[in-house]
Amino acid sequence: MRFAGFTHSIGKFHAKLLSFACAILLCAGALAAAFFVTISLVRSADSQQTFLQRTAAITSLVTPAYASQAEEPSTRLEDEDAFTVQAVLSPKRQAVISSGIDARITKFNVENGSRFKKGDILVEYDCAIDYGRMKEAQSRRRVTQKQYEAYEKLLNLKSASDMELLMARESDEQNLALIDQIQGRLKTCRHTAPFDGRVMKKMASQYEYAQQGRVLMDISSLEPLRAEFLVPSKWLRWMNVGTPLHINIGETGRTYSATIVAIHGEVDPVSQSIQVVAEMEAYHEELLPGMSGRAVFSPQVVKDNIKGGFLGLMLNPAGIEDHGTETK
């Protein structure tokens, strides 16, 4: 009995000792975890501070150069890329040919890309009914004309009244007006080329029925093409109508000479840019509307025109008067 009680006491003591050891181990683990977390936070703070210091150093090196570049981009005359913008070719004159009457197309004499001369017949319609109405109107007019002449003679013989002569004359005038209307409609039975040009896009074919207003094709003139592009509005300090430039076309890989012919009258307030139009010095067969490339201004041209730009012209009253005299 005594031995059993003694054994039970030892077991309880071992259990308490084991519990105490576990508690010590748990406390040691918690302290270790807290230590590692503290070390990680310290390292993270140090690395973040180092990163911020490095970023600040890089920014201090880069920001001054970028700020000077953004402040006055047009003053870097030694860099030719500073005066290069994207450009798109467009025709000098173009027209949308549409149907003026409701009729069937009998002849369509051109195709996509076809060239034509001024006055060539491009499209013809079936106007047989209108030609028949013309013959009818001409026949009626011959009758009323003879009636009017007869009433004039009868009036001289005192055999007709003034009212009868008036009615005969007005009837003749009505038939003449009807003939003029039909002749005007017959002029729309064909489309003739308004200038020497080329078909850009054909949108109808022979034997189709065209309603009034339907677009048949787009045409452009065979004249030196134009290049349209956007430039920073600050470039107006040296850019003006007549400023020379070069157009480098990507499709052909060649460079062409051009001259500015128009500057639009509004600056985009968001992008601080303005649209400019330049014209090639000559017509080139290999160039087509829609081709794109780069408009390049020589830095020497910028130096030579730094005081003769568009803004300088507009700010000089004498220049405005001279300009107005020239345009007149």
Image (spheres, helix red, strand yellow):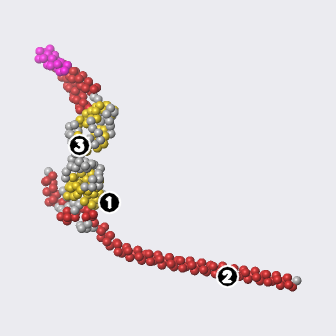
Which stretch appears magenta?
142-161
Q: Secondary structure at mark 3?
A: strand
Label drawn at residue 271: 1
Is residue 144 among what the camera can see?
A: no
Residue 153 sits above or below residue 82 on the image: above
Task: Say which residue appears at 27% left-offset and 49% top-offset.
Answer: 289
Q: Is residue 305 inside the magenta stretch?
A: no
Residue 252 sits above or below residue 55 on the image: above
Q: Position of residue 56 (x, y in %)?
A: 39, 75
Depth check: 202 or 152 in front? 202
Q: Is residue 145 inside the magenta stretch?
A: yes
Disc 1 marks a residue whose amino acid type is Ser
Q: Position of residue 173 (x, y in %)?
A: 20, 25
Q: Which residue is mark 2?
A: 24
Label drawn at residue 197: 3
Main secondary structure along the magenta-highlighted residues:
helix
Q: Earlier in the sequence, mark 1 or mark 3?
A: 3
Mark 2 neighbour density, 10 Å: few (under 14) some (14–19) many (20 or more)? few
